[in-house]
Amino acid sequence: MMLVSAANAQKILRNTSILNYQRGDRTWLHFGFTLGVNYMDYRVFMSGANAYRAETGKMDVGFLVGIISELRITDDLGFRFLPGLEFGTRRMIYTNVPEELDEYGEKDGKVAAYNESVYITLPFMLKYKAVRLNNFRPYLTAGTSLKYDFQKHDRLDLDKGVYFRTKPIDVFLEAGLGCDFYLPYFKLGVELRFSLGLTNTLVREYDSKNPGYEGYTAALKKLQARMFTLCFNFE
């Protein structure tokens, strides 16, 4: 009898749960916007051409603002186009730099390099949604994006810490996981996304207008851009 009573109580609880914003899963096309914070860095591949070494520096937090459009393919699958703007800074620390070592070894041989980026990003994503549980629905996303950096680093700028040049256009693989929370008038999605650049963003040619700093570029073989983003989606 106790088991029957417990089962009846669970059934009543399920039946009395209020499902918020049900039309959000029924429309074939819907829109929204996204806000987020990000962390950008490089996966660094050294060339071994000189004694310089490079590694990622301390974390700088950037931000994202964008538009959401989703086309419903099935009840569980949607195609998303998420154009937006991403702002952030990548830091690298060069070590064992001969120019920064004096004859007494009093300098540490370190140089800090900074690359600020303002991307326009054009992601195309698939969103696979699990079964809705009351007002929660976990999901996975995957896709690709094209990013263009308005902060062109086509010249060295030593005053701003730009010691190497990068290409403005890159293609990224995107993958994420999150959960939609259904509120009375909209749904809020919290998503953690990882982006990995597919190209070598380093410009190998030296900057002829800044002679004497070729060692910073020569030390690098490849730079692969990476990004971690925490998104808050309002749909």
Image: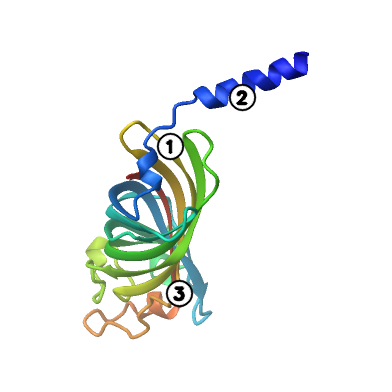
Residue 86 location (% of width, % of height): 29, 57
Q: Is residue 80 above or below residue 24?
A: below
In the foreground, 57 or 35: 35
Residue at the image point whose x is 56% and y is 22% from the top: 13
Residue at the image point whose x is 45% and y is 74% from the top: 198
Residue type, mark 1 in image? Phe
Disc 3 from disc 1: Cα separation? 33 Å
SS assignment at label 2: helix
In the foreground, 205 or 22: 22
User: In the rendered view, does 68 fall on the left or right side of 181?
Assistant: left
Q: Nearer the viewer, mark 3 or mark 1?
A: 1
In the foreground, 63 or 234: 234
Residue 177 location (% of width, % of height): 50, 51
Residue 149 location (% of width, % of height): 27, 68
Q: Is residue 198 above or below residue 174?
A: below
Disc 2 from disc 1: Cα separation? 22 Å
In the foreground, 68 or 11: 11
Pointer 2 residue: 11
Disc 3 from disc 2: Cα separation? 50 Å
Q: Which mark is residue 181?
A: 1
